[in-house]
Image (cartoon, helix red, strand yellow):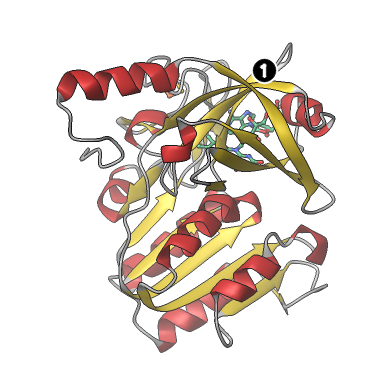
Amino acid sequence: MDDKRFPKEGKTRLLDYRIADNRLRITRILNVEAESPTVKTFAFKDKHCARAKPGQFLMLWIPGVDEIPLSILGAERDGTIAVAVKEVGSATKALHGMKAGERIGVRGPFGNWFTKKQGKILMVGGGTGMVPLLFLAGNLTGEAAKLIVVLGAKTEGELLFIDELRQICSGGNLVATTEDGSYGIKCLATTPVETLMNKERFDMIYACGPEQMIRKVFNLAEKHATSMEASLERLMRCAMGLCGSCVIGKYRVCRDGPVFATERLREVKAEFGVSKRDFDGRRISL
Ligand SMILES: Cc1cc2nc3c(=O)[nH]c(=O)nc-3n(C[C@H](O)[C@H](O)[C@H](O)COP(=O)(O)OP(=O)(O)OC[C@H]3O[C@@H](n4cnc5c(N)ncnc54)[C@H](O)[C@@H]3O)c2cc1C
Ligand code: FES
């Protein structure tokens, strides 16, 4: 990978950065905001992750509980980082119980990132899949000729970052869907994606969210011969390509992803949107 995050100071310097990125840094939570009934945003300082690009992730250590992978929501020049976390199990529940001033650990940034494309862009985010896409959308403002965002969730309360996206997407270029019809169109996010793709040609589709949703978007992108980049999630322990828990096809999502472009998505079609590995390495259906 062409590592544009790093100053061009030779291979040794690059390796130094990578080793330092992987070392656990202890920092304190600066701020906690509720985004929805199940999602909270946490801000903290970390100068390594401040270099992160949209699509990259970090490993967040919750003392005494676990270390979990999280997409980076935003990185400020002063080193402030934000992540948005949905409460799903033990680690995320413990994190949701934490307040400003409490200590957490950070490793990263890890993985590759979305490539910035110009022209007509379609973004599809489901649930917390909107986290890396919001970071990317902020970076594309002023560059994309047209940016349409399709945002999907089960209910109105779970639609994330709708105010921020309204500011980024002008006119009717933000399409919200809910499964219960409490806001926007009552359908899955893939329904307006199909309508939009039947109507106009996009230069790039970016997607993140439930993998079955991404797979449907991929099938549509293939049908319309449109390029796509998707951020995938797998169980992760090391985040360095060593343990194999994040494997998909011949790739490791932590090292070769999490962003997969069309060619690689084709290569992992047998597993993509179909199955993943559990904590014991067994293949389980998605
Ligand atoms: C690259 C990447 C980026 C992610 N970004 C975000 C994000 O921005 N916001 C967010 O809320 N979540 C994100 N996740 C998912 C997040 O890591 C898991 O929800 C978290 O690890 C669950 O931990 P837990 O102990 O609370 O739940 P557990 O009790 O471990 O499990 C609860 C559920 O979450 C799933 N899960 C558990 N661990 C992981 C894991 N390491 N990776 C993926 N799924 C897991 C399990 O299959 C189970 O269904 C991301 C995952 C990856 C791989
Ligand atoms: S998390 Fe260990 S190889 Fe990817």
Residue furthest left as drawn = 10
Which image quarter: residue 65?
top right
Asked whether residue 244 appears in the rendered view, the answer is no
Q: Quadrant of ligand 1?
A: top right
| Image location (x, y in percent) of residue 205 | 39, 66
- 48 vs 164, nearest the viewer: 48
Q: Residue furthest front?
A: 78
For badge 1, the amino acid type reads Asp
Q: Eyeballing the image, is 71 above or below 181?
A: above
| Image quadrant in which the C terminus is located | top right
> 230 and 21: which one is in front?
21
> Residue 269, percent across and down?
36, 47
Q: Is residue 168 above or below residue 265?
A: below
Q: Looking at the figure, which quarter contains the N terminus?
A: top left
- Residue at figure coordinates x 75%, y 60% from the top left: 154
Name the residue: 61% across, 69% down. Answer: 165
Q: Left or right: 247 with respect to 261? A: right
Res. 166 image quadrant: bottom right
For numbered disc 1, what is the local secondary structure? strand
Name, please, the residue furthest toward the top.
Answer: 64
Residue at horizontal 30%, vertical 71%?
118
Q: Is the residue marked 1 within 8 Å of ligand 1, measured from its CB? A: yes
Reading the image, the residue beneath label 1 is: 66
Q: Position of residue 12 (x, y in %)?
A: 19, 18
Q: Residue at x 47, y 38 (%)?
A: 50
Task: Give the image quarter of residue 27.
Answer: top right
Residue 22 in picture, x, y percent from top left? 43, 19
